[in-house]
Image (cartoon, helix red, strand yellow):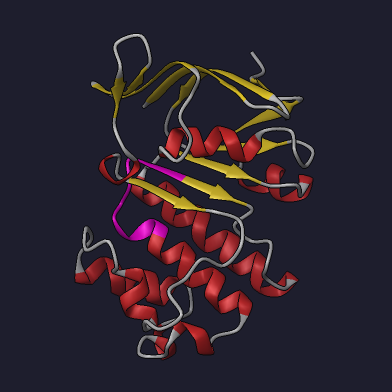
Amino acid sequence: MITFSFTVARPSMTVKAHGVLSSGITVLTGQSGSGKSTFIKCIAGLVKPTIGSIQCDEMTWVDKDRKIWVPAQKRQVGYMPQGNIVFPHLSVEHNITYSKRGTPDMCENLLTRLGLEQYRKTKARNLSGGEQQRVALGRALYSKPTILLLDEPLSALDWNLRKQVQEDLVSIIREWDVPCVWVTHDESEAKAVGDRHWICENGQIIIPE
């Protein structure tokens, strides 16, 4: 469980967030530039809050008053940013297992579920955009993270593949019981995958009661 209460002051916008991320899928929607990516980057440890704190179970990740800051690499967060962020010179299998925190069985499971078995030895540079998206998903999931942060995870996929990967991804998240924040602009996707729906509006994370 992730407990957070922080503010990020930036020249273009101030992002404020207060709440709890529990198990299941929290869908976050909002207009472009509303602060969605800044919010998940704070949870991931890629952006430092101006004030506030973030706690993961019994471990404090951020506490500005006490000068506590746990860097991203020590948070065991599965993060998939917008765009296909893969290592082009590495094979699909090497991309997925890059963190070395998972197991061979987990890698095989992901290769199968994401339809990548036949590409395991293929260099990522030789894959299509949609295939690279699935590799990035696999890498984010491989280490069975404490929280999974997905920023528009299906945006590069065509409609038919998008539906299949969506179902597989939801199935894996529920099987592993890992808290997930799923950012999307697609309202139908939000309704299909989310256990709860948060909205980011003008930098404010709105959590319905």
> Image quarter for residue 56?
top left
- 40 and 11: which one is in front? 11
The location of residue 75, given as percent across then percent down, is: 30, 39
> Image quarter for residue 92?
bottom left
State whether residue 111 is above or below residue 122: above
Q: Is residue 49 left or right of residue 111?
A: right
State whether residue 40 is above or below residue 143: above
Q: Is residue 184 magenta?
A: no
The location of residue 127, given as percent across then percent down, is: 54, 86
Q: Residue furthest front?
A: 11
- 173 and 140: which one is in front? 140
The location of residue 147, given as percent across then percent down, is: 39, 40
Quadrant for the N terminus in the image: top left
Figure disc tally? 0
State whether residue 88 is above or below residue 8: below
Q: Residue at x 38, y 15 (%)?
A: 64
- 35 and 161: which one is in front? 35
Quadrant for the C terminus in the image: top right
Q: Is residue 142 magenta?
A: yes
Magenta segment boundaries in residue numbering: 140-148
